Image (spheres, rainbow, N blue to C red):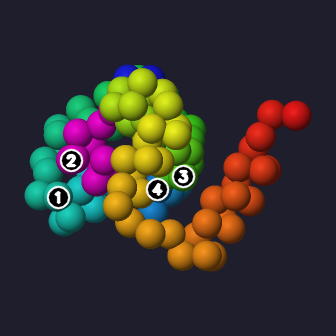
Amino acid sequence: MNAYRLSDSEEKFAELIWKNEPIGSGDLVKLCEKEMNWKKSTTYTVLKKLCEKGIFRNENAVVSSLITEDEYYSRKSICFVEDTFGGSLPRFLAAFIGHKRLSKQEAEELKKLIDEHKEA
């Protein structure tokens, strides 16, 4: 799951791609120069790294994603729960909710999610 552990700057870069894909690599360089103050070499170095991780591809000078932004954040969340709570979703929820009271609507939404994903 290391492919889903990105630095803050890599994550910002990934979000630029997701918001603008498909994007020509030359246009991506210009966008990164404007938004992140990166040089061309930095853009291509980070792009290559994220392509090697299987998040993006650069074919015929067009950059596009191999996974969606939602899928990335979903997998990142799974890694967080695994690393921090030993993969225990109940432990995560107990820590997340803490001393907070759930509204009736929040509790119903959680019950519905649990029912939809419960093993048969």
Report, in whole angstroms, how far the alpha carbon at label 4 lies from the one at label 2: 14 Å
Q: Secondary structure at mark 4?
A: helix
Q: Which badge, 3 or 4, is on the more N-terminal residue?
A: 4
Image height of 20 relative to 6, above or below: below
Residue ID for mark 3: 70
Report, in whole angstroms, how far the alpha carbon at label 1 lies from the one at label 4: 15 Å
Kindly identify the residue that appears in the image at 17 percent across and 38 percent down: 41
Q: Which badge, 3 or 1, is on the more N-terminal residue?
A: 1
Point out the stretch of residues depicted in magenta: 5-15
Report, in whole angstroms, how far the alpha carbon at label 3 lies from the one at label 4: 10 Å
Report the quarter where the N terminus lies.
top left
The 10 Å Cα crowd at callout 1, few under 14, some 14 to 19, many 20 or more, is some
Report, in whole angstroms, how far the alpha carbon at label 3 lies from the one at label 2: 18 Å
Q: Which badge, 3 or 2, is on the more N-terminal residue?
A: 2
Kindly identify the residue that appears in the image at 48 percent across and 27 percent down: 87
Report, in whole angstroms, how far the alpha carbon at label 1 lies from the one at label 2: 8 Å
- Residue 10 in view here: yes
Q: Secondary structure at mark 3?
A: helix
Residue type at the position of mark 4:
Trp
Residue 120, quarter of the rendered image: top right
Q: Which badge, 1 or 4, is on the more N-terminal residue?
A: 4
Residue ID for mark 1: 36
CB-based contact (under 8 Å), mark 1 and mark 2: yes
CB-based contact (under 8 Å), mark 3 and mark 2: no
Kindly identify the residue that appears in the image at 43 percent across and 42 percent down: 92
Residue ID for mark 4: 18
Residue ID for mark 2: 9
Report, in whole angstroms, how far the alpha carbon at label 3 lies from the one at label 1: 22 Å
The 10 Å Cα crowd at callout 4, few under 14, some 14 to 19, many 20 or more, is some
Between residue 48 and residue 9, name the one nearer to us. 9
Q: Which badge, 1 or 2, is on the more N-terminal residue?
A: 2
- Residue 65 in view here: no
